Image (cartoon, coloured by chain):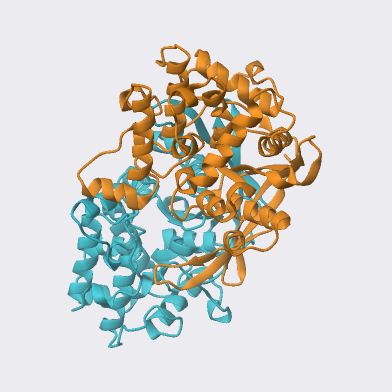
Chain colours: A orange, B cyan
Amino acid sequence: MPSTLLAEIFRGNEVESRHTGAFVVADTAGRLVLSGGDPERAIYPRSAIKSFQALPLLLSGAAERFRLTGAELALTCASHVGTAAHTAVAAKMLARAGRDVECLECGAHWPSSNAAARALAAEGRHPSALHNNCSGKHAGFICTSIATGRDPAGYVRPDHPTMRDVTQAVSAMVQTDLFAQAPATDGCSIPTYRIPLTALATGFARFGAGTGLPEGFAAAAQRLRDSVAENPAMLSGEGRFDTLVTAAFGTAVFVKLGAEGVYCGALPALGLGFALKCDDGSPRAAEAATAAILRHFLGPHEVLENLAAPKLINWNGIEVGRIRACVV
Amino acid sequence: MPSTLLAEIFRGNEVESRHTGAFVVADTAGRLVLSGGDPERAIYPRSAIKSFQALPLLLSGAAERFRLTGAELALTCASHVGTAAHTAVAAKMLARAGRDVECLECGAHWPSSNAAARALAAEGRHPSALHNNCSGKHAGFICTSIATGRDPAGYVRPDHPTMRDVTQAVSAMVQTDLFAQAPATDGCSIPTYRIPLTALATGFARFGAGTGLPEGFAAAAQRLRDSVAENPAMLSGEGRFDTLVTAAFGTAVFVKLGAEGVYCGALPALGLGFALKCDDGSPRAAEAATAAILRHFLGPHEVLENLAAPKLINWNGIEVGRIRACVV
């Protein structure tokens, strides 16, 4: 598992911790433009490919039938932080398909926004499956099931027809037959498959540029990208990496984190896609390295500077160190 | 920075993430009994040496003068999770010295126990410096300052006489002149110094066995170890590694985590000490590897089995993977 240094964590002037990993930037033909570590390493992309998993929602006609809004489509690609604004959009999607929270099979967890979690607790409430960071993606699976005349029950299982459509769409995006694999189980209970970094990067290059894709995929991808660009807060939450970058760059950049230190995304105008995995699963290193990669291709930008080299501030507001991306 | 594999994170049957680092188990003479990676790597031990930093509280007579209880002494060695039980003990310590929360210079943060944070929010309250995981250590510094006739103001600064006593005590424990270093700043604003792993492990072996120490140190160390063993919940919190291990083994094991993937501790009956640093700062790998090291010396025990190889459970309660320590 050859790796490269992704980021160093400084305390004072000394390196306290360090993160290694691998990354690939590729064009739509699968040519490597930049890489570090083993470009063929197979990883679980986790939530980084929610935008691929949302394609059947558009391809099936479900999005049109239920007149899904841009915010709703953005939420299907999201790992949201569970604010009232996010859960309201997820609930609305379910209502459009004549369903409610009871139909979600993602499980419940406290909002990943600490402020949202405390606000919920202050109201004496407990989280539901709507607060799960994946609730938008799951609401999309349910809309797809209903629109195609399927019982959504068990939609998280690999053999459910809607989940098979999802796996088929992801397979097409990464040009890899995922049905040949025994999947593992993701945090939200859907299957997760191992995919090589270069295949992911190439898939995202095509997702961004709209070339080299099966019929209908390019329009569906553009609808998702536009929806996310118009609703950056839906993609994650206030102050979070994905929301900050999307708010700053709009349709010029698509970025999405995955659990265990994964980032994937696209630079549509440049015809490039990227995929990155931090060996140890750390989001702080994956974020800093991704920001540095984006800066390399987009040029200096205040948002990227701050994300590639964030200061570490202690409980008294004193700067005690910093993170430094080491990839480019 | 030669490293060794500390732990692997499995999703299904595949390794999804991995953690490297270095560790040392040494005896009171500084002889290596077990190690992985570079045993001379200098690390910031962070909160793992709070028990060393608490020694001047006893050596100065402050603990006796203020009649500090076992729970209070345990809290000086702790990174507590900020429950009402923890903050009450910190407040009581300050009251014994005629001070209150206003004297603490550690800064405030929400309790690291999510349940405690939500309980605080549900009461419409905000955290104070008493909720800081280091409030017991800081209350100890204040008690030491008052007992020795010093103004506690500025006690977090490296040149405050109480902090100089603390640095002197740590220097004696690890037989390293820390005054020769320019310190970095810890999360709670006190200085933190780089110390080689072998020096830390040897210091903890002596802390546990009570041998090879300056006059008065052995009795002070034993008082702290006994206080922690009698009050395991003070050391961290319910369900946390340090509390679980201390509750299971009492005076037979002393363990303490530090930020950025550090663990230090002692096996007093065996005359051994240990120090471990995970390269990437991950607590999950540091915990699993520490549990495996303890199991290696203490033999099989249910608590250690669970901590060395914890199952990963998703939001629906499905087992999706596991952590596996790789050190011994």
Quarter of the rendering occupied by the C terminus of chain A? bottom right
Image x and y of residue B286, in percent: 51, 48
Judge left or right: residue B73 versus residue A138. Answer: left
Image x and y of residue A58, in percent: 54, 26
Judge left or right: residue B263 versus residue B233. Answer: right
Question: On the image, which quarter does residue B84 sit in?
Answer: bottom left
Depth check, front residue: A289 or B14:
A289
In this figure, what is the number of numbered marks? 0
Image x and y of residue B214, in percent: 44, 74
Judge left or right: residue A295 versus residue B189. Answer: right
The residue shown at (44%, 11%) is A149
Image x and y of residue B271, in percent: 47, 55
Judge left or right: residue B35 versus residue A34. Answer: left
Quarter of the rendering occupied by the N terminus of chain A? top right
Question: On the image, which quarter does residue A60 sit in?
Answer: top right
Depth check, front residue: A90 or B150:
A90
Question: On the image, which quarter does residue B276 sit in?
Answer: bottom right
Residue B258 appears in view: yes
Residue B34 appears in view: no
Q: Is residue A53 above or below residue B136?
A: above
Q: Is residue A50 above or below residue A150?
A: below
The residue shown at (20%, 44%) is A124
